[in-house]
């Protein structure tokens, strides 16, 4: 049986490299046109070329999102853009417009087409339709239950991709008009203002009924740890993590945690894995409440957001800029404040963690500092063990089960 693919988001070129180093089998990202993340740091044509080269060198695949629902004036340059993606080796596009889908199938020699979750595909008949059209993969709607996913997998031979982690949509796989109506930002052309996550007061006629907390339309984030073995056994082709706007630290922790879970299940075939072990690592990066989404069927109030505090966490404090092999100092880019005396935890792609107490901090000219205070500051630490580029440092924290 072919091993299931772990698919990671890549908000920029550096995050693409982090995702692959930390265990992704494939990455997806948007270019500067035709993508639903208009506010992301999207890839230029040269970035796409470099990203493909790096990914293929590390035996990973690249999928480019072209998943807007275009108006006429959005389609200028489509053929040229798709042909460029094809020429630099992009493995597939992810699309939800029949115009973009048909154009790629007609004009591109090797690049494949994956049907976006924006198509809200919930049944095997639609999967067969897209396969007959020429698509090689369908990204199922996030509203599918596990039983429905298994049934679809039995009745179709097209590749299936399933979301396992990240933001959910309060509408049906992104078909939402709140942002359009409230702030004139088109969610289906990359401009979503996430109006469902705003804080609202809820009234029954003239009586305010949310007395102790705000009302939110948005759902909790998805975390489907316990579903992974079932999806593997069902023959799903790809497990997808959402989060092109997330930090490199978030990508590293989420991807490495799911990588470990997937590998452990293939080794043991034991569905009674210690899921808390993976969950604790994920919770060191996740900053919103999570739930199982629709996997168990219709959602309940437990999947709804209320009176939340979802500010980004500050435990991630630095990333290693160069291998420190045989070097006296380790070069670090600071990400959040830390000081002498802090207890840190250092980790890399293999998930092995090393404890380290900060005893000295230096600037690039080896002037001593009492703390790393400035975002993106380049500093040096005396770390008495070997580290590699893109290993990460975080404040040592404990997550209770």
Image: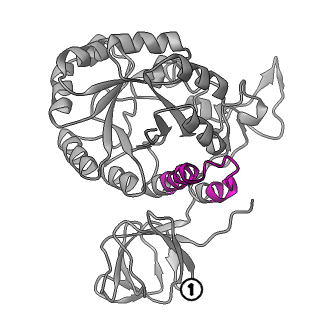
Residue 167 in sight here: no
Residue 169: x %, y % from top left: 57, 29
Q: Give the image location of residue 150, x and y in percent.
A: 60, 25
The quadrant in which residue 149 appears is top right
Element type at mark 1: loop
Q: Judge the density around disc 1: few (<14), some (14-19), many (≥20) Cα neighbours within 10 Å.
A: few
Q: Which residues are magenta?
A: 253-280
The image shows residue 170 at horizontal and vertical percentages of 61, 26
Write down the quadrant of residue 152 in the picture.
Answer: top right
The residue identified by callout 1 is 341
Viewed as shown, does residue 210 lie left or right of 347? right
Furthest-front residue in this view: 1
Q: Quadrant of the C terminus?
A: bottom right
Q: Is residue 378 left or right of residue 5?
A: left
* Residue at (53, 56) in percent of width and height: 260
Residue 326 is drawn in which quadrant? bottom left
């Amino acid at each position: 049986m072919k091993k299931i693919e772990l698919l990671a988001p890549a908000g920029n070129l550096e995050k693409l490299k982090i995702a692959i180093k930390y265990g992704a089998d494939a990455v997806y990202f948007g270019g500067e046109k035709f993508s639903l993340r208009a506010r992301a740091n999207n890839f230029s044509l040269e970035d796409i070329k470099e990203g493909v080269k790096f990914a293929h060198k590390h035996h990973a695949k690249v999928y480019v999102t072209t998943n807007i629902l275009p108006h006429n004036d959005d389609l200028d340059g489509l053929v040229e853009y798709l042909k460029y993606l094809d020429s630099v080796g992009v493995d597939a596009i992810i699309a939800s417009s029949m115009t973009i889908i048909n154009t790629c199938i007609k004009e591109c020699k090797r690049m494949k087409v994956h049907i976006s979750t924006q198509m809200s595909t919930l049944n095997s008949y639609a999967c067969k339709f897209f396969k007959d059209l020429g698509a090689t993969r369908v990204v199922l709607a996030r509203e599918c239950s596990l039983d429905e996913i298994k049934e679809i997998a039995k009745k179709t031979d097209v590749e299936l991709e399933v979301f396992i982690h990240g933001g959910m949509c309060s509408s049906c796989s992104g078909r939402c008009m709140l942002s359009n109506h409230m702030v004139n930002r088109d969610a289906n052309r990359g401009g979503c203002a996430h109006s469902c996550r705003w804080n609202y007061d809820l009234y029954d006629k003239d009586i305010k009924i949310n007395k102790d907390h705000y009302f939110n339309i948005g759902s909790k984030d998805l975390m489907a740890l316990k579903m992974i073995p079932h999806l593997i056994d069902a023959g799903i082709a790809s497990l997808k993590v959402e989060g092109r706007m997330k930090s490199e630290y978030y990508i590293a922790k989420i991807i490495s945690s799911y990588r470990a879970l997937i590998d452990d299940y293939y080794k043991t075939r034991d569905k009674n894995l210690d899921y808390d072990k993976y969950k604790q690592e994920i919770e060191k990066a996740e900053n919103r409440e999570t739930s199982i989404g629709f996997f168990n069927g219709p959602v309940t109030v437990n999947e709804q957001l209320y009176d939340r505090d979802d500010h980004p966490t500050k435990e991630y404090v630095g990333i290693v800029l160069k291998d420190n092999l045989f070097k006296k100092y380790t070069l670090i880019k600071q990400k959040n404040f830390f000081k002498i005396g802090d207890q840190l935890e250092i980790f890399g792609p293999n998930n092995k963690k090393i404890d380290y107490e900060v005893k000295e901090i230096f600037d690039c000219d080896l002037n001593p500092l009492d703390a790393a205070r400035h975002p993106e500051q380049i500093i040096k630490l005396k770390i008495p063990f070997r580290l590699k580029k893109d290993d990460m440092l975080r404040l040592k924290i404990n997550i209770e089960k």
